[in-house]
Image (cartoon, helix red, strand yellow):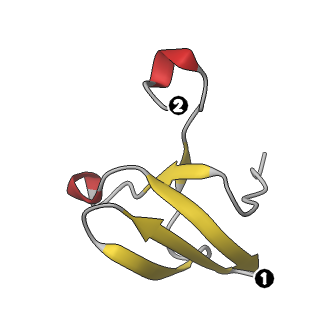
Amino acid sequence: MMTILTPGKLVRHPGQPDWGTGQVQSAIGNRITVNFPHAGKKLINADVVKLIPVDDGPESGQR
């Protein structure tokens, strides 16, 4: 099942955990722009990298 990544969704990059939890800025086709706190804005090819959605509930520490 493919998760739809929409602007505002919180994600992590599986190969770059030190980038932190990023926020999706835009998603056009397979091109996802994410703003990471420790790496800045990154353009991700969703055909190559499967971003990990982060639950933004109280258990995740996000507010």
Circle on res. 44: none
Residue found at the far left of this picture: 18
Can you name the residue that lies furthest to the top here?
59
Q: Quadrant of residue 13?
A: bottom left
Q: Nearer the viewer, residue 43 or 57?
A: 57
Query: Where does the image place residue 50, in percent across and percent down from the top left?
Result: 54, 60
Question: Please, what is the three-letter code of the amino acid marked with disc 2?
Answer: Arg
Q: Earlier in the sequence, mark 2 or mark 1?
A: 1
Q: Give the residue at x 52% y 51%.
A: 11
- The location of residue 51, given as percent across then percent down, is 53, 58
- Mark 2 and 1 residues: CB-CB less than 8 Å, in contact? no
Give the class, few, some or many, for how many residues have Cα within 10 Å of label 1's Cα (few <14, many ≥20). few
Return the x and y of residue 36 as percentages of the image width and height.
38, 64
Q: Say left or right for 57 vs 17.
A: right
Q: Amino acid at mark 1?
A: Gly
Q: Dot 2: few (<14), some (14–19), or many (≥20) neighbours within 10 Å?
A: few
Q: Please state which of the two labelled residues, at mark 2 or mark 1, is closer to the viewer.
A: 2
Q: Is residue 39 left or right of residue 32?
A: left
Residue under pointer 2: 63
37 is higher (above) or lower (below) than 58: below
Instruction: Judge whether 35 appears above or below 16 on screen.
Output: below
Q: Residue at x 59, y 31 (%)?
A: 55
Q: For the point 76% across and 61% down, which residue is it?
A: 6
Location of residue 42 in the rendering, given as x and y in whole percent from the top left corner? 43, 80
Q: How many marks?
A: 2
In which quadrant is the N terminus drawn?
top right
* Residue in the picture at 49% in, 15% down: 59
Q: Secondary structure at mark 1?
A: loop
**Mark 2 → mark 1, Cα distance in angstroms:** 28 Å
Mark linked to residue 29: 1
Label 2 element class: loop
